[in-house]
Image: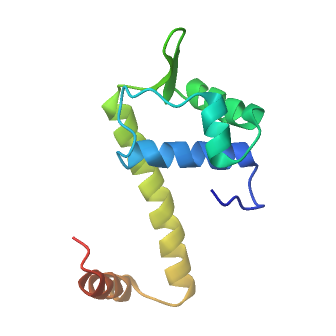
Amino acid sequence: MNFSGDLPIYQQIMEAVKNNIISGEWKTGERLLSVRDMAVGYGVNPNTVQRALSELEREGILCSERTNGRIITCESEYIESMKAESANKYIGEFMCKMKNLGCSLGEIIKLIENTERKEGIE
């Protein structure tokens, strides 16, 4: 993972974990790798991963089971609300940038439709 300098690394790990869950790459009820294995995968100190996972537990995204380690919440409604929240954030940022370019809503919609056709996005 390539970390940027604008956010603390533990927050970037939190975002990566959330994105893996929201996208469905990591399934509800699935057990996460150990802190040590995740730290090796991300190339960071285990304490950094521990902090990220503890924060995600506080948010209710992860649950800690004494014998099974950490698992992803089984509350699919919560994951759907996280997905909607993330989508709204990205859409808001996108719309702000497009308006700064001087694009109207109609122009933005046309640009999206053209991009969709070019990229074959369904």
- Given residues 55 and 16, the one toward you in this image is 16
Q: Is residue 104 above or below residue 11?
A: below
Which of the 4 image quadrants contains residue 40?
Answer: top right
Where does the image place residue 69, in percent across and percent down from the top left?
53, 18
Give the side of residue 122 with respect to residue 102, left or right. Answer: left
Q: Which residue lies most toward the top here?
A: 66
Residue at (60% x, 42% y) in the render = 14
Give the number of marks: 0
Give the side of residue 33 with respect to residue 84, left or right. Answer: right
Residue at (49% x, 72% y) in the render = 94
Q: Is residue 73 above or below residue 115?
A: above
Give the side of residue 99 with respect to residue 41, left or right. Answer: left
- Given residues 33 and 49, the one toward you in this image is 33
Q: Is residue 15 above or below residue 109?
A: above
Q: Quadrant of the C terminus?
A: bottom left
Residue at (50% x, 43% y) in the render = 18
Where does the image place residue 76, in percent across and percent down from the top left?
32, 32
Color style of the picture = rainbow
Where does the image place residue 75, in percent across and percent down from the top left?
35, 27
Q: Quadrant of the N terminus?
A: bottom right
Residue at (51% x, 82% y) in the render = 99
Which of the 4 image quadrants contains residue 106?
Answer: bottom left
Where does the image place residue 80, in percent across and percent down from the top left?
34, 41
- Given residues 114 and 18, the one toward you in this image is 18
